[in-house]
Amino acid sequence: MIRVGVNGYGTIGKRVADAVEAQPDMEIIGVAKTQPNFEAHTAVKRGYPMYAAIPERAPLFAEAGIELAGEVDELVAEADVIVDCTPSGIGAKNRELYETHHTPAIFQGGEDADVADVSFNARSNYAAARDADYVRVVSCNTTGLSRIIAPLEEEYGVEKVRATLVRRGGDPGQNSRGPINDILPNPIKVPSHHGPDVKTIFPDLEIDTLGLKVPATLMHVHALNVTLEDDVTGAHVRQLLEGEDRIYVIPEGLGIDGAGKLKDLALDAERPRGDLWENCVWGESIGVNGRDLYLFQAIHQESDVIPENVDAIRAMFELEDQKTSMELTDRKLGVGI
Ligand code: NAD
């Protein structure tokens, strides 16, 4: 049983904790938080021992009626692995703490690639994390792109990827983010930094990306053009993508015309927090012109990286091979619509 600590119990951290707890070969031994907000109370209700991420703030937890199991230093010392889910940039600062205790760690996509020995996507480079002490699970967008590029590369060969990423302005709880009434080329500089991030998973890939930000919180939407090395048919690509467990090809006729209805689908299915762990590819959008493939996919930024964190733990500790780990993670989480 791998003993896992989560440092940073926010949007990603709380989901990682629940996903780890659902697995038979790993358990949460504690979570570290900076403040006793509503998420801290959720953690307590779920039975996760609470550690103070900032020792001077420990009294705030007592005042809020939350009993602390200790300070983050103790959690790091006790854990077999820490999943660092702190905001972008803090993970890199925390690496020294993990090194001091010789505790391996998984970082998230908000960190630069050099925070870890390897950038990770379970479908694309599972084996690269074998035996690594520091692994970075790539961002929500890079995870979404990698999951679709991997099967295309294996089946047809990929000459070039061009992707336009229409990004949500912020997560539902991030009420200080925006825009609230604008459409921003973001970053304005093209191509955007997302392409180079995908190349941390596929070093030899030709890829250009463009980014925008829009007044939405639900999901990102990608408009994708992939030039393949072989002529293909849309039907063949569709069959290929339908065979991927972490890709949901949205059938025609369901009336799902946007991210809002996808989120409703997840809530109707009583998925935890309305999460959509899969890339959601509109079947109707899969179009082919010679070697050029086009499609739209929606990515639930809050949850698509969650199964990847679980697989990263198994890969680092060499618990299972890629296929077994991904299948187990998916079964225990309920991935697959
Ligand atoms: P978040 O702000 O929702 O959660 C971060 C948590 O860490 C908060 O609870 C915060 O209080 C806590 N924290 C702050 N400083 C800390 C410290 N020094 N020690 C311990 N905890 C601290 O952020 P998030 O959205 O969960 O993002 C976490 C990481 O995941 C980032 O690298 C981000 O880029 C990445 N990521 C986010 C998303 C997303 O859409 N939210 C998607 C994929 C990856």
Image (tube, rainbow, N blue to C red):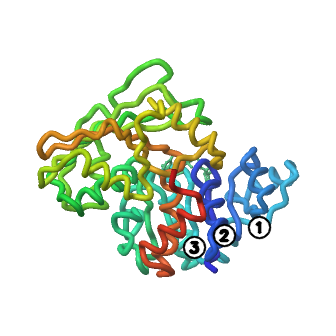
Measured along the vertical axis of the image, is residue 19 above or below residue 294?
below
- Name the residue type under label 3: Val
Measured along the vertical axis of the image, is residue 186 above or below residue 15?
above
* Front: mark 3 or 1: 3
Residue 138 picture quarter: bottom left
Rendered residue at 70%/70% (across/down): 29
* Dots 3, 1 in contact, CB < 8 A: no
How crowded pointer 2 is (Cα within 10 Å; few <14, some 14-19, many 20+) is rated as some
Q: Tell me where residue 33 appears, x and y as whole percent.
A: 69, 55
Q: Earlier in the sequence, mark 3 or mark 1?
A: 1
Measured along the vertical axis of the image, is residue 184 above or below residue 240?
above
Circle 2 SS class:
helix
Q: Tell me where residue 302 appears, x and y as whole percent.
A: 53, 46
How crowded pointer 3 is (Cα within 10 Å; few <14, some 14-19, many 20+) is rated as many
Asked if residue 3 can be seen in this view, the reply is: yes
In-front residue for pair 324/120: 324
Circle on res. 73: 2
Circle 1 SS class:
strand
Q: Tell me where residue 272 appears, x and y as whole percent.
A: 65, 49
Rendered residue at 64%/54% (across/down): 14
Q: Residue furthest front?
A: 253
User: Which residue, given by chain and number where applicable, does mark 1 sit on?
Assistant: 70
